[in-house]
Amino acid sequence: MIIHDFEMDLTTYAEKGLDNDFPAYACPNPECSSINILHRHGFYWRYGIAEEDIEYIPICRLQCPVCKKTFAILPDFLIPYYQHTLHTVLDQVENVLSFLRCNDFCALGVKTGPGSLLVFC
Ligand SMILES: [Zn+2]
């Protein structure tokens, strides 16, 4: 898998679809002797989920002409094997950490009961 910065977000990438500018790469397999760039090997489609957006997007696949291994070019806003975008996951982690920080270390002594997910100190 090759992580590539397409310099756009999920929505823009989805709008461009198959017209995105998919880059050329040399074979990343350290055991391969190829000096050629990888060949296009089709696409597969997967979901990308952001806070308020779900998109079905193409992922370009490349294949090495020498070792025959295939590699997917994953946009950098996605996490391998996850449908949620990187920013969506990080925002949720930040929300959970903020909640824990307030509950565990709040100098104001604010207590929360069941169902109280947000406490602002
Ligand atoms: Zn190769």
Image: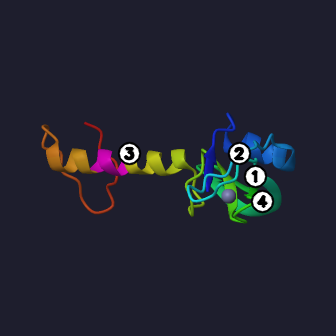
Indicate the quadrant where residue 49 lies. Answer: bottom right
Q: Position of residue 27 (x, y in %)?
A: 67, 52
Mark with earlier residue (1, 4):
1
Circle 3 sits on which residue? Answer: 94
Q: Amino acid at mark 2?
A: Tyr
Q: Are marks 1 and 4 in contact (CB under 8 Å)?
A: yes
CB-based contact (under 8 Å), mark 1 and mark 3: no
Q: Which residue is mark 4?
A: 65
Q: Which residue is mark 1?
A: 38
At label 4, counting other C-alpha atoms closer than 10 Å, the crowd grade (few under 14, some 14-19, many 20 or more) is: some
Callout 1: CB less than 8 Å from ligand 1: yes
- Asked if marks 3 and 2 touch (Cβ < 8 Å), the reply is no
Numbered disc in front, either 4 or 2: 4
C-alpha span from label 4 to label 3: 43 Å
Query: At which x and y percent is residue 31?
Result: 57, 59
What type is the residue that disc 4 sits on? Pro
Identify the residue position indicated by label 2 in the image.
25
Q: What residue is at 76 percent from the left and 62 percent from the top?
A: 45
Q: CA distance from mark 1 to mark 3?
A: 38 Å
Compared with 117, 5 (above or below) is above
Q: Are marks 2 and 1 in contact (CB under 8 Å)?
A: yes
First to last magenta residue range: 95-99
The amino acid type of the residue labelled 3 equals: Glu
**Disc 4 element:** loop
